[in-house]
Image: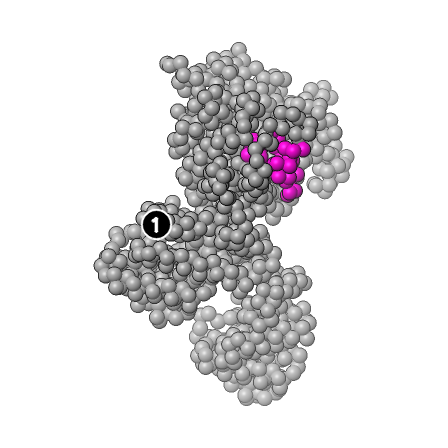
Amino acid sequence: MLAEDKRSSSLLDRGIESTVQSLLDRAPRFSVGQSVGPYRLERFLGEGGMGVVWLASRLDMDLPVAIKLLPSARLSPMRMRRFAREIRTLSRLSHPFIARIYDAGAMSDGTPWFAMEYVEGVDICEYCRLHTLSVKDRLRLFHAVCETVQFAHGQEIIHRDLKPSNILIRSDGSPRLLDFGIARQLQKSTDDDDKTQAELRLFTPLYAAPEWRSEGSFGFNTDVYSLGIILYELVTGQAPGSAAGEALAPPSRMIAARALVDASTRSLLLSGKSYWRDLDALCLHAIDPGPARRYPSVESLLRDLDHLLEGEPLEAHPDSWRYRAEKFILKNFRALAFSASALVLLLAGISFFTAKIAEQRNAARAEVARTQRVEQLLESLFTGGDKSAGPKRDLMATTLLDRGVKEIRMLEHDPDVEAQLDLTLGRAYQQLGRFDQADQLFRRTEELCQQAGSSQQLNLGRSRLAIGNLRIDQAKLQDAEPYIREGIEIERRQLPADHPEVVEAQVVLGRLHLERGEYSQAVSTLTLALHSIPATDFARRAKPLSLLGDAYFYLAKYPDAETMYEQALNCNLQVFGYWHPSVADNLKNMGLVQAEFGRYREAEKRYQQALQISRAWYGPDHPDTADYMSYVADSYYWQNRIQEASVLLKDALDIMVKNYGEDHPRVALVLNQSGMVAHEQGNLKEAEKDYKRAAQIYRNIYGENHHMFAAAMGNLGSIYLVEGKLGEAEAACRRAIAVCAATQSPTAVNTADNRIRLGRVLLREKRYAAAEAESMAGYQILTHNPGANSSFLARAREDLAAEYAAMGKPDRAEEYRKLLQSSSAQ
Amino acid sequence: MTLLAKATIDLIFSLVYEDLRRLASYVHYGDQHQTLNTTSLVHEAWFKLKDSPRLVDLPLSHFKSIAMRAMRQVLVEEARRRSAQKRDAGDAPLFPAIGGSGACSEQFLALDLALNELAQASPRQAEIVNRRFFGGETIEETALALGVSESMVEREWRAAKAWLAIKMRGMKG
């Protein structure tokens, strides 16, 4: 046994480290002469974050290639997908300066590989040093590199790991761009595996833009930053210091300093002073740590590079509209909550328009494809969930929009483009809650399309639908229907039945049913719409799924609701990844379902996740974040974690007040909840204060004749009763009843609840007959209503029993006592 | 399993793999990292994982056991691949690796099988091996995590090792 003990587990005793080492060591897996597909490995070239690279040759012709292999691919699904993506990316990029892909496959053990052009050359910085190129020549070479990157951007591919060692210059002086291993397509968000976890972000820190390095957000001008650093290195012969966030010295100063000790650098400084000033400006503009202040695109960097080479003034000028717009973005960076670079791209699109207008309208027409991209971005920007971004930010965003509207007017008449842009901008206004402006734009489009006649039928349908959709937001549900129906009809005539726009219209109709409380109709309309959307079209499925979830939820079909919400969540995860407000919203809804099932612990988990996402997306002080806090608090409340609920609600309240001021329904909502919690804690004074404040807010905003005011009065009545302030309690309950009966109906559940409340007050005042009348009236309404709250039913039975007992009717008292017992036994 | 849970495990799996790779290369180049012993490297890997934003709401113990499972799985897969390669190549090793990794992978696969059996026979001993070996925990840490005395962990650990050794020898034969 002792001997066993010793020998045993040499493995166990050596520890996991040695096992890891022997199993995953870097010993070459591949060997010279081994064949990979039709190639023969010849020489190990290097290893990067994404696999090993070998020089190889084709067996049947003497063509040298570089082969990239991904060892142990099966062990990391994420690597496997990335590798596949690199192959896809490269095969889409056919450009003389991008190393092209020849072939791809997998070895017998599953190791994937691809063969690409073998580039013999030296890295760009080394090349400039070796050939002692002049600054101008370096700029020209850099220009060619930028053009290549711009080409990739035109295919919506972002390299994300540009650095000198990935830019080789061949002996003929032409550059080759290598290693798209972590490149990413901008709009294809179905490439879901890129979670951009810090641990998996494989890049070279020195050349990586700060937002990409630290936050994982990226856009076209992530590459601009890397190019800027490379330019810096090219012209100064030295990469800028790597201290993050530190302001970098202008290249000219850097060179001047180096020239003191290094004679070869001196020659670089020979060109004129103003030239260097511009070069400094260009360089620093490209490597600005703030993505919003940087060149928005390689295209704009190229323009300034041209200007520099031609000796013209640069565009990187602080007085331009774009510069100001960028400042706006900078200020609202987190609030607008979209990848900064996408924002900049959007603006670049708009300013691109401006530039084109100045030239000629034909050019603008040729850009319709681009317009559509701008449109997509615009919409996704605002659909990103900025609906509640608070008044100040709205104002600024609308200023921007106003500008956009003006520019479209100057575009002369391409009615089709104009109509579509008007609709887009209108939707943007709608997202921001600027319903009047949206209305104006939609109706203007409608009118123009009507005048244009048959050529603009489709846009006419679109504008009708847009108006209908807007009416839903405006809560003008009756007005909405005819617009939506007409819109659908026109679109059906113009487009095939399963066209995305027709289906989308169907979804709008479903939403209308939902808002009108026609839940079964909503279910059938939305289900129908879903049938026409392919199962893999996650982006289009998310919305109808989530609406369908709502419909089931209101129909109290909770398991169905849960399924729908879960599917919607899956879609959104595919489209946006985890950290997105849509995902938070799905999670919240799933939490609501759990809460309906009484699984508060589960509900809490979902709410917490939603809260976490909201914090990351909107920041800690955003009203949506506060909303999710109050959901979490609600789940605490039901789990009897009153203290925690109370603390969380105080924070939520602060946030709401900070954002909306004292008088706002969202403030009142939190107050209401915090009153409930204080009540539960036995802190009656605090509860009374909260309810009073809430009632006050509703009165100020909606007037007294509103069901929200009634709800607050009802709560106040309850607390007065507990405090023993019976007179005040009675008055509050009577007010609540009157308002409920007038605004909802005399037989509404809310009316009944308040009558039961009043009954209890009267019972306490020993006015038994009056009490019995109220309790009974409320009770009867509730017994005929499936949506009744069981605690009010129980309360009514309890009170009725007491009232009949006091009125000398023991039989009836007994009847209700029994009912009470049997219901509580259930 | 919900998509979310699956995504979490997928992610942990991939992250563990990244860290193991990094770990292997550290160990390989050995001595420059004298201040960091290898156990602390394993720990470091986990701390990094633990701080991944997506994983924060898993309780640490739960998370750790997922990570350990993932790590074990990564190593088993790799060991399988290696021993398969070795079989294919006959007696002449095509891929000569430092430290005779072929032998190591056989041994490791045997250990994995034996551990599965141990988990049936004595779940606690298996848990202790998991924690000590895959988790790099000290006797003290394991005792704390399992809520038992150190001497108990010490005893069980030795018993488990002996048991595993016998099993593993049996498998070879």
Horizontal side of residue A498 vs A738, given as left or right: left
**Is any atom of residue A746 visible in this view?**
yes
Residue A313 image position (x, y, % from top left): 50, 44
Pick the residue in front: A474 or B134: A474
Q: Please, is residue A136 above or below residue A812 in the view?
A: above
What colouring does the structure picture have? one colour
User: Percent position (x, y) of residue B70?
Assistant: 57, 35
Residue A353 percent location from the top left of the image: 40, 51
Q: Secondary structure at mark 1?
A: loop
Say which residue label 1 marks. Answer: A360
Residue A716 placement: quadrant? bottom right
Q: Is residue A187 above or below residue A100?
A: below
Q: Residues within 10 Å of mark 1 (few under 14, many from 20)?
A: few
Q: Could you tell me which chain the residue with mark 1 belongs to?
A: A
Query: Would you say A94 lies left or right of A6 here?
Result: left
Q: Residue pushed farthest top? A: B92
The residue type indicated by label 1 comes to Gln
Q: What is the x, y in percent for residue A468? A: 35, 65
Image quadrant in which the N terminus of chain A is located? top right
What residue is shown at x 58% (from left), y 84% (from top)?
A: A730
Give the residue displayed 62% in from the left and 71% down from the top.
Answer: A675
What residue is shown at x 48% (from left), y 31% (from top)? A140
Residue stretch in magenta:
A229-257
| Residue A157 part of the magenta segment | no
Q: Residue at x 50, y 21 (%)?
A: A121
A263 or B125: nearer the viewer: A263
- Magenta-colored stretch includes residue A255: yes
Q: Between A268 and A571, which is closer to the camera in this rendering? A: A268
Visible residue check, residue A420: no
